[in-house]
Image (cartoon, rainbow, N blue to C red):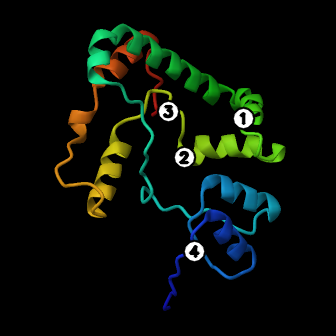
Amino acid sequence: MNPKIVVIPGGENRIVALQNNQLDATLVQLADWLHLDSQAPGRFHIINTGNLFNISGASFWANGEWLAKNEEVAFAYIAELLKTFRMVHANPKILEPVVAKHLPDIPKHLIAPTIKAYLEIVRAWPQNGGDTSILDDTVKFFTEKGELKPGVNTKQMVEPKILANALSRIGKIPGAR
């Protein structure tokens, strides 16, 4: 096998190429894949890549000076956020009206599958606050690509006390992230 690798900018363009049998496989955003699957159910499949794409630019960040003066606020905020994540895991349907209101471009029939995919595939909304592995993988990925200078220490970026305190207040869910 001798694959031909091409670069096609824009997820919507890659979706069209897949639909027209011009590509065998491509990287697309989860929302694009869900839209594609709704148009041709079962024709396309997500390939399990392990942790190949275990990177993220999203985290909760706080100014260190503010955090030192407002730890109690941070503890309470993270505890309430985790309670919300747990509510979503217990009943994903509670998100449907919120998604419909704030993301009106998502077709109504894709809202429930999108929430399910974010829970199962993306592993969004970690009930115990997650861990730093995604941050570690993100820094490694961007360092290897030359986007970050070597030597970024993720342990210095994370203040574990806030999450630990929030979990001591609301408890941990066994087996959850």
- Report how far apart the C-alphas of labels 4 and 1 lie in the structure: 29 Å
**Residue visible at 48% across and 24% down in the picture:** 173
Q: Amino acid at mark 3?
A: Pro
Q: Three-letter amino acid code at disc 1? A: Val
Foreground disc of the pair 3, 4: 4
The x, y position of residue 177, in whole percent, is 45, 34
Whether label 1 touches label 3, CB < 8 Å: no
Mark 3 burial class by Cα count in 10 Å: few <14, some 14-19, many 20+? some
Q: Earlier in the sequence, mark 1 or mark 2?
A: 1
Which corner quadrant of the image does residue 16 belong to?
bottom right
Q: Which residue in the structure is indicated by mark 1? A: 99
Residue 104 percent location from the top left of the image? 77, 40
The correct choice, above or below, for 50 with respect to 118 in the image is below
Mark 4 or mark 1: which comes first in sequence? 4
Give the spatial CA distance, label 1 vs label 2: 17 Å
Label placed on residue 122: 2
**Mark sitting earlier along the chain (3/4):** 4
Q: How far apart are the two marked residues, 3 and 4, measured between alpha carbons? A: 33 Å
Q: CA distance from mark 1 to mark 3?
A: 18 Å
Residue type at the position of mark 2: Val
